[in-house]
Image (spheres, rainbow, N blue to C red):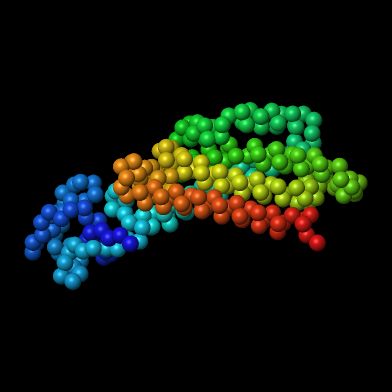
Amino acid sequence: MFSSKVLHKKENGTEKIIPVKKLISEDDKSVKYVDYTDKEITESIAALVKKDGNCIFDMKFLLGTDRFGRDILSRLIYGARISLSVGLISQGIALLLGVFLGSIAGYFRGAPDRVIMWLVNVVWAFPSILLVIAISIVLGKGYWQAFVAIGLTGWVDIARVIRGQIISIRESEYVEAARAAGFGSSRIILRHVLPNSFSPVIVTSTVGLANAIIFESSLSFLGLGVQPPTASWGQMVFDGYKFLITGTNFGMVLFPSLAILLAVFAVNLIGDGLRDAFDPKLKK
């Protein structure tokens, strides 16, 4: 439990909490203080909320505050929404691309297979994080740019897995029976082939989701992802690593790093559970 000096200011009918780095002076009319941007600010007593006769008082923070006096726990919770949403949306893009292209390559073979696998090999030739950074630089910095960049690089694993599964399934007896019954290729793929090939795809997708969370954190750490003041775990690590070097306020790096670790670990556990639940071969 950490404490920090704050004051409450009345603004548009609501109370606003303002962190105070240093109190300079206080009298019956005004309070003069230094905020966390090292600016001297003078506030009228009439605009402040008094508690126990004081305008400035100590406030408890469970995980402490950052260099701007912001609550680390609140930013961790808010950053979870950013990091997880970027991971989910980017992996959704990768899943759609990978399943679509992998299904075409594996089922139709021939020229479509050669073209798609050539594209897969080209994308795979680049290190993933470098390709994500390159696409982010082209698209620009921001929230949607991050998940588009990650999604456009994460589909190759899914496409290869889907292709391999469909190649082994397309000659099965139930697929031959569906062809003999006159069903079209799209119906056979959607109703008969994909459901029996999705178990490894689920595992691959959850691994990709974990990687997407790490990539988003890496982009934010490098300043190419979600931009401040919006909270994200990677940006929080960047804000605190300088303090880690000096040996002070190590929680600014430790807590968001633990959040990334736990999120990735949880996603992998969820993937294992989904594989066991949806794999037709494991059902009795």
The percent coordinates of residue 99 (x first, y second) are 69, 43
Which of the pair 146/4 is nearer the observer? 4
Q: State left or right for residue 31 relative to residue 272.
A: left
Please report the residue visible at 75 percent of the width from the left and 32 percent of the height from the top.
113
Image quadrant for the C terminus?
Answer: bottom right
Q: Residue furthest bottom?
A: 52
In terms of depth relative to the viewer, which is nearer, 231 or 218?
Answer: 218
Q: Is residue 59 left or right of residue 224?
A: left
Residue 175: % across, % down: 86, 47
Q: Judge whether 120 appears above or below 275 on screen.
A: above
Percent x, y for residue 98?
66, 41
The residue furthest front is 247
With 240 as the anchor, is 128 left or right in this view? right
Residue found at x 74% / y 29%? 114
The answer to which of 162 and 61 lies nearer the viewer is: 61
Q: Is residue 115 above or below residue 283?
A: above
Q: Is residue 190 visible?
A: no
Residue lying farthest to the left in this orientation: 28
Tell how many labels: 0
Q: Left or right? Give the position of 211 relative to 115.
A: left
Q: Which quadrant is the N terminus positioned in?
A: bottom left
The image shows residue 249 at horizontal and vertical percentages of 32, 49
Instruction: Identify the residue at horizontal 46%, vertical 39% (top origin).
Output: 219
Residue 5 in sight:
yes
**Image point (15%, 70%), residue name:** 53
